[in-house]
Image (cartoon, rainbow, N blue to C red):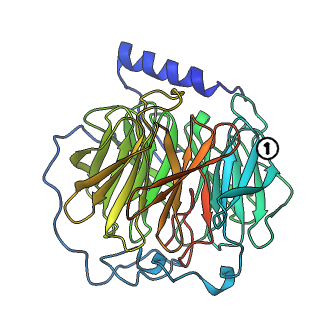
Amino acid sequence: MTFTPRSLRIASAAALSLLFGTALSAHAQTTDTAPTQPIAAPTPADTTTAPSTVHTIPGMPAVINPNNIYSEASAGRVAPAIANDPARIYVPNLRGNSVSVIDPQTFKVVKTIPVGRSPQHVVPSWDLRTLWVTNNSEGRSDGSLTPIDPATTLRGKDVVVDDPYNMYFTPDGRYAITVAEAHERLDFRDPHTMELKGSVSAPQCKGINHANFAADGSYAIFTCEFGGYVAKIDTVNLKLLGMLKLSRGGMPQDIMAAPNGRKFYVADMMANGVFVLDGDTFRETGFIPTGIGTHGMYPSRDASVLYVANRGSNKIHGPRRGPGSVSVIDFATDKVLKTWPIPGGGSPDMGNVSADGKLLWLSGRFDDVVYAIDTDTGTVRKIPVGAEPHGLAVWPQPGRYSIGHTGLMR
């Protein structure tokens, strides 16, 4: 298999987009060619309430509150099985081939764990018992997953996996999904052994990388970083349902489901804001300007607001001490309530909220630091870590199960 370095894929995607537009027809490996969703003008936001009962896919835990899929991930709801795991922040250092482990009580690095090449994200497993480090070995063919036991902070033996840029879990716990970004492909695997069970190809989804799932677990929406699209995936039948071209920008990053599990927010680092989608109808319904280089997003513990990291640059490799910030969006109104700049400049990227909801932990991608941001005041503490920190995980987290990434808990 020939791999193209990520920087060259970015340049190639941009050049092709300018010269020809995006004209490839997406298809699923396990099904017939899926139709491309036509570009539609944004429609008014959906203001209807969630149904009284959510009929989930078989094997998925019940949705307790149909109006709030995050109800079981609120403060104080840490599962008994992980309640005694040491509180730590696990930070993958992309260019350091290591994970820095921070004690959130002292705000100091207490351990450094060597891992595979190009660690991108630290991903809690569906059953909450393993933290998987996704080492996609940029530009090479020796990708791997490093398991870390969060009860002991000890690493296990690497598992060889093709290009695992990111990883998710279907809400029923049946599959782990490794995101093979370089190949525009999703690999569905046994969630414990990582044995490959099936794949879905989406060649129109250049730079496939981040995802989130509907309230009932029946579909996921993945972002396509290098093409300006999002892809809708059937999580039961493992097939591509369609593609949607966003109306502006062109570099979608993280995606977050609203508390009702039907509305989705898509961060776009070229549009400098967040697109709003209706997941069921797969239509764009709005746009919320936030800041320069919009990137990562995380709901508050009470699911009232969405924290949005603005990385301070529209470039993949931005400068140090850029005009980075965090915007706070009200879920009820889709309005920005406030924006916290990083003092002295910075590059807030990926992370999560502390178990009690009092701190937002984000990697400082271009500044080799981690930010601990007070969610009441916006006050920032900075902790030096390794080279180019990326998708950090906060542990333990409230919730019954993880659907992956840096700890999407439900």
Answer with left or right where residue 347 lies relative to residue 100: left
Q: Can residue 33 be seen in this view?
A: no
The residue lying toward the viewer, choosing from 361 and 133, is: 361
Task: Give the quarter of the image for residue 15.
Answer: top left
Identified at 40% across, 84% down, the residue is 64
- Residue 310 location, x and y as percent? 40, 42
Residue nearest the observer in this picture, 287 or 325: 325
Q: Which amino acid does label 1 sit on?
A: Gly
Vertical side of 140 occupied by 408: above or below: below
The tally of labels here is: 1
Quadrant assignment for the N terminus: top right
Left or right: residue 388 compared with residue 234: right
Residue reaching furthest to the top: 19
Where in the figure is residue 347, as x and y percent of width and height? Answer: 49, 39
Q: Position of residue 36 (x, y in %)?
A: 33, 39
Q: Residue furthest left?
A: 44
From this view, report whether residue 218 is shown above or below residue 158: below
Q: Which of 312 and 332 is in front in this view?
A: 312
Would residue 38 be seen by someone viewing this image from the given angle?
yes
Q: Where is residue 377 in the image (x, y as percent from the top left)?
A: 38, 60
Between 320 and 278, the one nearer to me in the picture: 320
Q: Residue 337 vs residue 270: left or right?
A: left
The image quadrant that residue 65 belongs to is: bottom left
Mark 1 neighbour class, 10 Å CA radius: few under 14, some 14 to 19, many 20 or more: many
**Which residue is the site of mark 1?**
116
Residue at the location (24% across, 49% down)? Answer: 283
In the rendered image, the residue lying farthest to the right is 157
Q: What residue appears at the point 25 percent right and 38 percent down from the top-left corner? A: 38
Q: In the shown orientation, is residue 322 left or right of residue 245?
A: right
Q: What element carries label 1?
A: loop
